[in-house]
Amino acid sequence: MWRRSFCTGAASALKETKWDALVIGGGHNGLTAAAYLARGGLSVAVIERRHVIGGAAVTEELVPGFKFSRCSYLQSLLRPSIISELELARHGLKLLKRSPSSFTPCLDGRYLLLGPDEELNHSEISKFSKRDADAYSIYESQLERFCKFMDPLLDSPTPESLQGTPSFTDRLKNKIHNSAFWTSCFNRALSLGQKDMVDFMDLLLSPASKVLNNWFESDVLKATLATDAVIGATGSVYTPGSGYVLLHHVMGETDGDHGVWSYVEGGMGSVSMAIGNAAREAGAHIVTNAEVSQLMIKDSGVVDGVLLADGTEVHSSIVLSNATPYKTFMELVPNNVLPEDFILSIKYSDYSSATTKINIAVDRLPQFECCKLSHPDSGPQHVGTIHIGSESMEEIDTACQEAVNGLPSRRPVIEMTIPSVLDKTISPPGKHVINLFIQYTPYKPSDGSWSDPTYRESFAKRCFSLIDEYAPGFSSSIISYDMLTPPDLEREIGLTGGNIFHGAMGLDSLFLMRPVKGWSNYKTPVQGLYLCGSGTHPGGGVMGAPGRNAAHVVLQDHKKSSN
């Protein structure tokens, strides 16, 4: 299904045209950029290395009858502007809201359910702390205010200084644009108020542990919320700046409901398929099984297209790379083209990862002992994200420190999701698909190698055994599984270091600093080469904003050069 829909042409068809723009990589951001460029009147070709489009937002049937969201597994961050402008619902996107959205089982027989229902949240949190139950809605309201403050920043390029030697007119336009940007930020800050602005800065700069300790007293509530602050990161809840990652993961929405995460019918590949359908309808050409080996750069330093691994030359004066910044500049751009200071900034950016994804086919739902239920049907505990092995922030930190010392966590932090409870299209009747997003797993373990099948199986069984403590018999329900460690994510999906965000999301690598200082506006030192992936502003997640923003910059530059 996935392959047939998007093998839209062989590599040989690419060289027959002088394209207005080429996009390297058919991940969701690359497809988004292609859709907007095609709608802007440019002839566009997307070149994808794998047999399937989607990048990390992909659905693959790895076990007969079971369709896995192989990497990313939940939707919330995809920008409403993209869903609306590209008419993604018409192109097949169907979101399945989760309520409740979170379940944390405890070994002492208790559990915590959370979701969009305020009454449920108050009742559930009251089991652990009446004080926390009263504070929780106030905490959520504050985060929502912060998200509204941040929201306009996501849908526009950064107010970057002009590179090169711009004309007087360009300098004037840039000054007016940047002044308007900062004036808008200042006005929003005034409307937020001084107290909230101080709290906002505290959230950005502080460890998540400090933020959550200031709000709550219950260990299980703090740990449940803290997972959003470390997801996909190598840091701990005690790492300064981890509060921003927490905010990043609650700034999304589903159908206008803020902070609500959803499954996607057909898996996360359906997001990429819908965007790809919109791009094709606008005239974009999407080619799979075609790998870019190098960018072609003229002697003048201007991009001239790409060279494929089979030797095919594809020409264009505009190239957008959806690959990571490291892959783009250290592997695809020829030597002696980029400034030395730029190369050093890219080379020494943080691409570290501690993330492993395990996709499992099971013959029955896990039965959590704390729920005291024995029937096989799904319940509220199966609908949302199930937090395993994180009943306190100290447990999360211990797991992190073990990985810092080179060892996969003895008791990993696991986010379990069971999308087949709501999505009946991805598994056979009575059977289920389970996603495990696992931390912390070092890229190069000191006690073994991820290339060793025995070592890999040992870690997988460690994760399954931990789940058995909460849901006895889980291990025996497993039909088959697929595991992606950090090196696997790098090799299979193209994520440098296995980092799911195309680079760390620390405060030193966001906004005007992403991917590196001086080049945050999707442009690069190579004229005609742009970045459009998660390594650019506003960052990682299935958001689409980098692709949309980059396309608007390209269209503006193209219009200027055509006049």
Image (cartoon, rainbow, N blue to C red):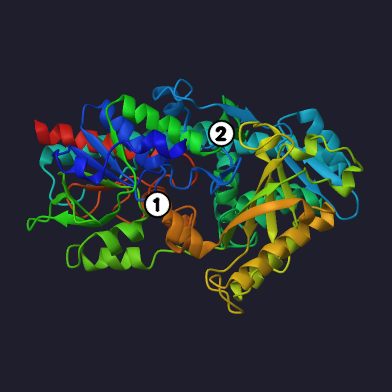
Label 1 crowd (10 A; few <14 / some 14-19 / many >=20): many
**In which quadrant of the rendered view does residue 135 lie?**
top right
Query: Depth check: 470 or 137 in front?
Result: 470
Q: Amino acid at mark 1?
A: Gly
Check disc 1 and report the residue beneath it. 535
Counting from the top left corner in percent of width and height, residue 212 is at 70, 51
- Identify the disc placed on residue 155: none
Counting from the top left corner in percent of width and height, residue 66 is at 61, 42
Q: Is residue 211 visible?
A: no
Residue at 39% in and 41% down = 29
Query: Depth check: 24 or 200 in front?
Result: 24
Residue at 72% in and 31% down = 99
**Mark closest to the chain's N terminus, 2 or 1:** 2
Q: Is residue 122 left or right of residue 25?
A: right
Check disc 2 and report the residue beneath it. 266
Q: Is residue 36 left or right of residue 5?
A: left
Counting from the top left corner in percent of width and height, residue 160 is at 29, 46
Q: Where 386 falls versus 450 (above or below)?
A: above
Residue at 57% in and 73% down = 452
